[in-house]
Image: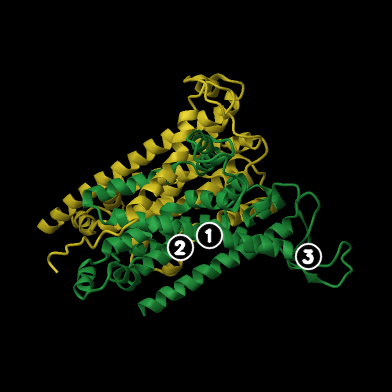
Amino acid sequence: MAADLQPKASSSTSTYAGLGIPLILPAWAIIGFFLVLPVMMMLIYSFLTKEFRGGVIWEFSLAAYDQFFFDRGLFGDELPKIEWTYITIFWRSIWQAAAATLLCLVIGFPTAWFIATRTARNRSIWLFLVTIPYWVNLLIRTISMKFLIRDNGPMNELLMASGLISEPIHIINTNLAVQLGLFYSYLPFMVLPIYAAVERYNFALSEAAADLYASRTITLTQIILPTIKPGIIAGCILVFVPSLGAFLAPDLLGGAKNFMIGSLIEEQFKGAAGNWPFGAAASMILLSLVLLVLTLYARQQTREQG
Amino acid sequence: MASKKVDLRRFPGFLPLTYLCLFLLYAPLVIVMIYSFNDSASITRWDSLSLRWYHDVFFGVEAPKFRAATINSITIALMAATSATIVAIMAATAMLRSGRFRGKSASFALINLPLMVPEIVTAVATLIFFSAIGFTAGYLTIVLAHIVFCIPFAYLPIAARMQGIEDVYEQAAQDLYATRFQAFRLVLLPLMTPGILSGFLLAFIISLDDFIITNFVKGAGIETLPTAIYGAVRQGIKPNIMAISTLLLVVSVVFVALSYFVGRMGEKNNDETSTKGDLI
């Protein structure tokens, strides 16, 4: 989406030639001063000593990263062992984000396909229908999901009243609840790029395959999927990346057992833990993870184009 | 082969999955809307239809708190969206209308940076930054943080629209002795209106929606609507929260519908300008 808007050298007009730098300056100043500088500051803070109950002491220390990766016993005098607590939380987040991405793909792909194969006029109505919930406040969507899937919520009541089940299905505070919450948070990010790819797909290719006696499954896996793969990958990245650092879905739907990175970081600043350098270090590790995913994606993109 | 006519666009199972998708998207919202009209003080038991909780939202014990939070949310969103829109218009003009300049490709990455950094990381970094420079957390810190992440959302529709307008109009104006500023203000800006409006609306909704960053940078005692609602649901979902949610939901949908129609209006205009362009 965004890449389309990058100006190409040929299409660049120059009515306001020479004014480029003064015009771009406010954007540079604001994002530079209030985002780039803060991220650098965060990197510095992750190497400082913690002050109890929030804040830092300006003294270099590797304690935050050490605490993240190594367990040195209660008094810090034992031989370092690998500390699994935080690695487990990160691993769970990656796993949950991947599961949510898969859920979005399994449901979002057919939806995107269905929309893209409607008539041009109906398409925009269907797209509108799928994107409306995204514009409803994320917190409200998450609360609604929680309300619906509670043990004694409307879904279970309805199923029990209809005699389909005798005991409520327990979803809240499970992995599935978090995945449903993440699905609800980021589904349009999956549907829109896949929709764009399917819309560009030339169905003459499917016809050619059918003429050569390809079955539908073969057509789907051998012809269609490879053609629209860039859209699918873009969708997966757009869902996976925000899911990784999500806070509301795991916090409201996951309960204490399904702690994810977002909650771990939040607790260092807003909660009882109050360890700023550790929170900064965990944020740096999350940011590195995200940048790694984005770099791999960018490299793969250029390889496919080149 | 002619006898076996299959629609190659259809795959078995896709339609049910599409319906499942719509069900998952709408069921929670519809249920909350229905239960917001429940007379019961308990959220599990259905009593009878009433507007009791809407009355509670506007006149109940918690009404002043939510009213203050709503006012904060709206004023912050207005300021953040306005600033972000102005910055985005300038940036788009630089990127699409000013030829080459140093740092142009880096500028594109920079404008999109707020979309790439995870929200929680932005929240932490901003909190640390304000604390390090001794800036007291409060109303202003929220506005500044919101401007940053609103910029890319305002930029996308504005740049898309500007790219769709050929520069022949501004050149014609300049041929007729308009200054560059006049060409911008009297020619380009009016043509840009739909893009600017949808950029502004998008930024406005995004600001209104934010919870994580606001929660980190807000000062004690200052609440926006999402942080106030979050605080209220910590103890469990109460019926008045469902009434607020329904109200907010309706407002969001109206805004999106508005932005959608403004966008379509823009497309129609675009077609007209392009045919006019052909005539020239």
| Residue A188 versus residue A213 in the image, above or below | above
Write down the residue under mark 2.
A236
The quadrant holding residue A170 is: top right
> Where is residue B261 drawn, in percent x and y?
29, 41
Q: CA distance from mark 3 to mark 2?
A: 35 Å
Say whether residue A132 is left or right of residue A283.
Answer: left
Quarter of the image with the N terminus of chain B is bottom left
Q: Nearer the viewer, residue B172 or B28?
A: B28
The quadrant holding residue A200 is: bottom left
Which chain is mark 2 on?
A
Write down the residue under mark 1.
A99
Colour in which the image shows chain A: green
The residue drawn where x is 52% and y is 31% is B242
Q: Residues within 10 Å of mark 1 (few under 14, many from 20)?
A: many
Q: Residues within 10 Å of mark 3 (few under 14, many from 20)?
A: some
Write down the residue under mark 3.
A63
> Where is residue A167 drawn, in percent x and y?
58, 40
Which chain is mark 3 on?
A
First in residue order: circle 3 vs circle 2? 3
Q: Nearer the viewer, residue A96 or B152?
A: A96
First in residue order: circle 3 vs circle 1? 3
